[in-house]
Amino acid sequence: MKVGTVKEIKKQEYRVGLTPDNVKSYVNAGHEVFVEKDAGAGSGFCTEEYAAAGAVILDTAKEVWDTVDMMVKVKEPLADEYPLFHEGLILYTYLHLAADRPQTDALMAGKVKGVAYETLVERDGSLPLLAPMSQIAGRLSIQEGAKYLEKIFGGRGVLLSGVPGTPKAKVVIVGGGSVGTNACKIAVGMGADVTVIDLNIHRLAYLDDIFGARIQTLYSTDANIENAVREADLVVGCVLIPGLAAPKLIKEKYVREMRPGSVIVDVAVDQGGCCETTKVTYHDDPIYEVDGVIHYCVGNMPGAVPRTSTIALTNATLKYGLEIAGKGLEKACRENTVLYSAVNTYDGKLTCKNVADSFGMDHTEITELF
């Protein structure tokens, strides 16, 4: 199969879909790999490394799109890339369709086989292609939140750990999954007063076992969220339902009740955000203020550490990518039924139920198509 990757065009996105080591793996498996010149420069991978690994280097993204059977990316394609779609193309990347109707329509119109990292669910219920970026985003959320609590950035001027004789900062983490757990690790490690809120009692029990008396766990109710958010210095939104838009658990009313200079980091922004006052921001202008509360809502947080993020992501995606390239999407799905869960669009049809439900659209079960 002809496999390719291009330079990401999303604003300040420096990750890349394939590393030179990945290229070598595809080439050794008998595939041809095409890479846009300087595609990996933002992550510290030079064009010469790709060429040495066996890739064919092309000058433009269009050349790569026009050549390949399977495109491996990091972020969802933007409007400028829609005209580059071609029928039967396998697009293997994060798609986040539930928050992006135009992209969904473009993938269907182009009859693209959209394989989304974020909806691939393993047999044990884990999300292996979302996990590495969730880990990074969770850890970054506390790092960024701590920074914007500084007075120079408009924050309350609160140190997460405090010092002897002063109160610790109150950190509230809404969602106890992979993002929330990693946020919790860093917040606890920095000495903050941490509360984790989740709807899953078993998850709360797990977190309680891990962190013990260092955290407070709360069951997710409107009252518990409102009360916790009102008292928080830093709120981290980590809610995820695979394929669905994030539920708006942090209401605008709760934001108005927060103290001026408090900070909200909404990691769920890729899926529309779990706070009613969320809007997407970028690394060069990451924050805005609503009712005196600083909001950090960067849509590609792991892009701030692209070297680490690219290696972590491609460690996870390579295995499944080689299966798809080696057998074709259809045979790969039949032989590894886990892959069915990642197929969001196929031959002009929407095949992910959660995405369809987000838009009030019909969907077609992927197992009925091949």
Image (tube, helix red, strand yellow):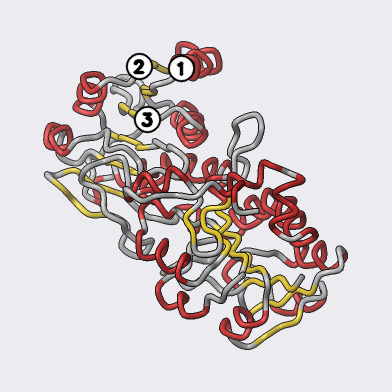
Q: Nearer the viewer, residue 92 or 138?
A: 92
- Looking at numbered disc 2 in the image, what kind of residue is underneath it? Leu
Labels 3 and 2: the sequence-earlier one: 3
Classify mark 2: residues with Cα within 10 Å, few (<14), some (14-19) or many (20+): some
Lateral position of residue 50 relative to residue 132, left or right? right
Q: Position of residue 260 (x, y in %)?
A: 15, 39
Lateral position of residue 97 relative to residue 318, left or right? left
- Looking at numbered disc 1 in the image, what kind of residue is underneath it? Leu
Lateral position of residue 179 relative to residue 173, left or right? right
The label shown at residue 272 is: none
Q: Position of residue 303 (x, y in %)?
A: 50, 58
Q: Residue at x 31, y 49 (%)?
A: 296
Q: Position of residue 304 (x, y in %)?
A: 48, 57
Distance from the alpha carbon under mark 3 to that under mark 2: 10 Å
Labels 3 and 1: the sequence-earlier one: 3
Residue 54 in the image: above or below residue 116: below
Distance from the alpha carbon under mark 1 to that under mark 2: 8 Å
Nearest to the eye among marks 3 and 1: give it.
1
Please tell me whether mark 1 sits on a helix, a strand or a loop: helix
Q: Residue at x 66, y 32 (%)?
A: 123
Distance from the alpha carbon under mark 3 to that under mark 1: 12 Å
Residue corresponding to mark 1: 204
The label shown at residue 173 is: 3
Residue corresponding to mark 2: 218
